[in-house]
Amino acid sequence: MAKISYISGSVVKARLEGERPSLLEMVYVGNEKLIGEIISVSENEVVLQVYENTEGLSLGEDISFSGEMFSAVLSPGLLGKAFDGIQRPLDKLGIRIKKGERQFPIDPEKKWSFFPSIKKGESVFYGQEIGYVEEGSFIHRILSTGEGKAVYVADYGEYSVKDMLVKLDNGIQINMLRKHPIRVPLSFKKRLRPEIPMITGQRIIDFLFPIAKGGTASIPGGFGTGKTVLQQTLAKWSDADLIVYIGCGERGNEMTEVLNEFPQLEDPYTGRKLIERTILIANTSDMPVSARESSIYLGITIAEYFRDMGYHVALMADSTSRWAEAIRELSARINEIPAEEGFPADLASKIASVYERAGFVETFSGKKGSITVIGAVSPPGGDFSEPVTRHTRRFTTVFWALDKELASSRFYPAINYMLSYSGYTDTVKNWWENISKEWYELREWMIKILQEDDKLQRIVKLLGSESLPEDKKLIVETAYLIKEIFLQQNAFDPVDAHSSPEKQLKMAKILKLIYDLWVKAYNEKKIPVKILKDQPEIYLFMRSKYEIGNDQIEKYDHIIEEIKERYHQLIMSYGE
């Protein structure tokens, strides 16, 4: 037991009275039993961060210690649910969350049909699948939390999450429910090289700046550049088995849109509702900052739980800047010495502690699973040199830089193709070349054209495009087609919202074909670029991304033949 001696927002100090609590131990604060966590311990005093509003808390009120770290509840029943930053189910909390209210994350009385995978007398190792339950279309694997010989195995039947399913000869009892401290990573057998791309359906990402399953990416961008829409698009279309979406310190209306929209969306891969393979963690900007800080760790612990079953999980964190701001506020309240822009000195290590939990791994059961972490960053004024963006860039391998100027011109996704990069290009190369050997060559050609165009645009802005020689106009007009047809993508168009790898490759090949034909026409007949670009087949190709679906890419072959025929006739007849 301890007595409150100091209150400053979410930070509370208490005098110890005999007990010796542990660092990061969960506590219950005051008469209303608010949930908190110990962040500092000295000989006679503890410092706590409280995950709920502390208005009305008084000096001298009691603090009781739980004896355990703040942990995530992991079991069947998580999918399709929305939680706050300390895993209280939002559907049970009502419109107004009462202080000190505690709700168990899942229904502990619900019965699940259990299918055993082992038999009595078998030796069981840690992480082995002992059985599974069906959660909608999802197979929820129940993993062993101990090792030994099974002296009891439950038969097929209906069980709650707390019912014993397996008992080992050393006395360990295993059920569907487990708890794990959110700040302690779940262990795995071996980390593997991320070589499989996570297909998002976004051409500028998949084709130019790919992310591998088990990889890390940051999406920095100023206000209004489309970070939230891009993350929601990735959540809808990525080919991960599960999505964990964390709204960390975002505006309430944006999270309301997510909570209302996701249950209505159809999953493009299963035909069922997208929410069935999604877990939402909503911690809006008006909620306590300490709970905002814990929401990231809660989300990644849940992701690790499903990864250990052999699934590929995509975790979207929007936005890690709000999370870092919560860390800064808590640091200031406990009088830590500030470093850059008021952030604590350990900001870099805290950012690393999140992104390092991503990875493509081999689990103890021999399966392969992954966590792909994609974090949005909101640099003030769009300044990418500020501490959160800079440190995040150090610990992520993909950098999708959102551009205010592109967003203002209605170019979405507003990813700046000159500032962005991916460190997974070489690791996913084999996967792409199994589809087409031309992928790497096409990607390099496209980036080269965009780079040359970027240099020429400075002249164009000063003197106009007519000041360029014809061979340079070819570059500028080709880059225009790449940007308008390939890079720009409408997230709300039913056809253009998602492009399969096969469609992306076909579109890239047509762009390269057009460029080669333009170069040939100019070299052989000096045909002006104005004539070359103003052919009806070009406009037909521009419209095709809204008309040709992923299951109709053979229609592009017809467009290819028409383009070849048009420029062949043009070259033959020009000047006659």
Image (cartoon, rainbow, N blue to C red):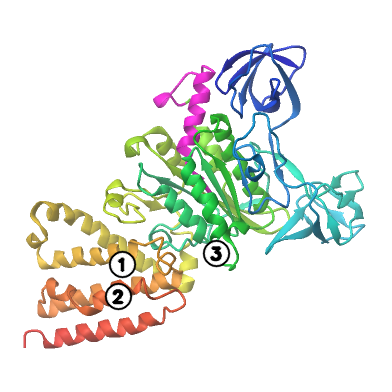
- Which residue is drawn at the image coordinates 39% and 26% (left, top)? 341
Instruction: Please tell me whether the stretch drawn in magenta is mainly helix, strand or loop.
Output: helix
Q: Is residue 330 magenta?
A: yes
Q: Which residue is mark 2?
A: 541
Mark 3 and mark 2: Cα distance apart in space: 29 Å
Three-letter amino acid code of the residue under disc 3: Glu
- Residue 92, by quadrant, is top right
The picture places residue 544, in percent across and down from the top left corner, at 34, 74
Which residues are the magenta region? 316-343
**Which mark, by number, is residue 266?**
3
Please give left or right for residue 332 compared with residue 102 in the image: left
- Residue 559, by quadrant, is bottom left
Mark 1 touching mark 2, by CB under 8 A? yes
Q: Which residue is mark 1?
A: 485
Three-letter amino acid code of the residue under disc 1: Ile
Looking at the picture, does residue 292 appear above or below residue 337? Answer: below
